[in-house]
Image: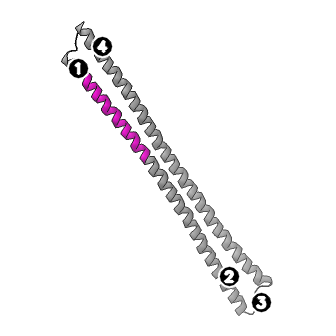
Amino acid sequence: MGIDPFSLAAIGLAAAGTAISVRSQQKQADQEDKIADQQQMQSREDASYAASEAELQAKVIRKAADKQRAEARAALAGSGVVVGEGTAEQIDQEIQAGGEEDALMAIYDGTNRARAISRSGDLAASRSRNSANASRYGAAASALQGGATIARGWNTGSARKA
């Protein structure tokens, strides 16, 4: 009424194979979770860098506009024009407005780049998390399949002895 050694060995091998498969898929899931976290962290850092770079670019643009305004005022004053009135004032305001518009566009572009980088990182992380979940489901399926294989082996071994 016992189980023959070959059936017992087959059951043991099926159990070991199932355990290895389940553990491997669990490790795969853990690795995919780590990758997802790294992808999100990297995208946040990249997005922050893009936003900072845009702010710096805006600062450079504003500084260049201020320099251009000063040079225009100096040139106008050097030619005898009264600075701060009429056409001279209008030129100064146009230079300032143009510089500010360029600076704001740099910030806007940087903000859009940062948003796109974040979105891309979130999507990559989502794909990795989906892969991790698939590995977890695969581990569960392997465990169930291994259990079924062992049960069939057990029943087959018992049926032969009867």
Residue lying farthest to the left in this orientation: 5
Residue 58 position in % (x across, y down): 61, 70
Mark nearest the camera among 4 and 3 is 4
Q: In this view of the protein, which residue sits in the foreground, 66 or 12?
A: 12
Marks 1 and 3, Cα distance to the nearest angstrom?
105 Å
Marks 1 and 4, Cα distance to the nearest angstrom?
11 Å
Q: Which residue is mark 2?
A: 69
Q: Residue at x 35, y 20 (%)?
A: 148
Report the span colored magenta: 10-34
Marks 4 and 3, Cα distance to the nearest angstrom?
106 Å
Q: Residue at x 48, y 46 (%)?
A: 125
Instruction: Tell me which amino acid carries mark 3.
Output: Val
Quadrant of the snapshot with the C terminus = top left
Residue lying farthest to the right in this orientation: 86
Q: Which residue is mark 3?
A: 82
Question: Looking at the image, is mark 4 or mark 3 earlier in the sequence?
Answer: 3
Q: Which residue is mark 1?
A: 8
Mark nearest the camera among 1 and 2 is 1
